[in-house]
Image (tube, grey):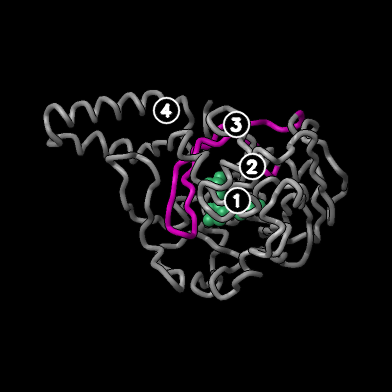
Amino acid sequence: MANRWKNTLTETDVTPETVYLNRRQLMGGAAGIGLAGLAGPAMAQEDALEPNEWDDITTYNNFYEFGTGKDDPARNAHALTTDPWSVKIDGMVDNPGEFAFEDIMARMTVEERIYRFRCVEAWSMVVPWNGFELADLLNLAGVQSGAKYVAFETLYRPDEMWGQKYPVLEWPYVEGLRLDEAMHPLTIMATGIYGRDIPNQNGAPLRLVVPWKYGFKSIKSVVRITLTDQEPPTSWNIANGREYGFYSNVNPEVDHPRWSQASERRIGGGLFARKIPTLMFNGYEEEVASLYEGMDLRKFI
Ligand SMILES: Nc1nc2c(c(=O)[nH]1)N[C@H]1C(S)=C(S)[C@@H](COP(=O)(O)O)O[C@H]1N2
Ligand SMILES: [Mo]
C-alpha cells in the first residue's frame, strides 16, 4: 500500500518476515564469522524502522486498568468484553450519537502505519498498526467551528477491569488533544497490529495513536470522544501535574523531573537490544513541528 507519510513504511516496504529472516541470517553469520562487517546491515535495519515482534508488542504493556506490571495486561485483559462496543461522539459536533464499532469500521479506510512508539518511561518499540485517521471520523461527526479540543475517555467497567477498583489513577482514564493535533494525518485510531485485530492488552477494539507524543497520550479502549472549546483534563496530568503536561510531545531536550529523556531503550532484539537516542517529536519533527511554532516547548510540557 502506498504511503504518503515519511517514516511510515508499510509492510510492502519492509515485511517482518524479511526482517526476521535477515536477523536470523545476521545471528547465524555472527556466530560463524564474527561481528566484523555486520554493522552495515544492522544499521540499515534501524533506518528502516524494523517493527518489533508481535510477542514484544503484546506482552510488554501499560494498561493500568489491568494492573501496573508490564505483564499484567497480557494476563488479565482477556476479561474485557469488546463486542458489542460503541463509541459516543458528542459535544461540539453536528451529528452527535452513539456509534457501533462495526458501523464506524464500515465507514473508515483502514491502512497500515509503522510508527515509533515512545513511552515517557524511556522505553520504545516500533509498531505496525492498522487503523484509520481520526480526522476521517471527526469529519463524519461534523466538527463545529467553535471546537478547539478533543477529549477521549476509556471504558469504565470495574467488573472487567479490576485495576479500576483501586485509586491508582482517577477512572475512567481520560486524554485530550488540541483539535489541530487530532486532525493531523499522523493521528490514527488503531484497530489492529500486524493485520490482526488489536489485542485487548493493546486497547481493543480501538485506541488512539499519536506517534510524536509520549505513549500515555495514546488512550486505549475508547468509548467516548467529545469536541469542546476547553482544554480537557488528562489522567496523568491529574495524577501528577508537575511531571506530566497536556502536550507531552516527545522531546529529548526536556528531561522528566526524575530521569533523562535524551535516550530510550528499544524493547526486543535479544542480542541487539540497545539504548538509542530519542528523536525530536519522536522522529516526526518535519511533519508536526509547525503545530507548535512560537510555543516554548520547555513551558508547554
Ligand atoms: N486506558 C488506558 N490507556 C493507556 C494506558 C492506560 O493505563 N490506560 N497507558 C498508556 C501508556 S503509559 C502507554 S506507554 C501506552 C502503552 O501502549 P501499549 O501497551 O500498546 O504499548 O498506552 C497508554 N494508554
Ligand atoms: Mo507510557
Q: Nearer the viewer, mark 1 or mark 2?
A: 2
Marks 2 and 3 sit apart, C-alpha to C-alpha, by 25 Å
- Ligand 1 closer than 8 Å to the CB at disc 1? yes
Marks 4 and 2 sit apart, C-alpha to C-alpha, by 26 Å
Task: Count residues near mark 1 (Cα–Cα under 10 Å), then give few for <14, some for 14-19, many for 20+.
Answer: many
- Disc 1 to disc 2: CB gap under 8 Å: yes
Marks 3 and 4 sit apart, C-alpha to C-alpha, by 16 Å
Q: Which residue is mark 2?
A: 77
Q: Which residues are magenta?
A: 106-135
Marks 1 and 3 sit apart, C-alpha to C-alpha, by 24 Å
Task: Count residues near mark 4 (Cα–Cα under 10 Å), then give few for <14, some for 14-19, many for 20+.
Answer: some
Residue lying at 68% horizontally and 40% vertically, measured from the top left? 206
Q: Nearer the viewer, mark 4 or mark 2?
A: 2
Q: Which residue is mark 4?
A: 16
Residue 298 in the image: above or below residue 50: below
Q: Nearer the viewer, mark 2 or mark 3?
A: 2
Circle 4: element type: helix
Circle 1: element type: loop
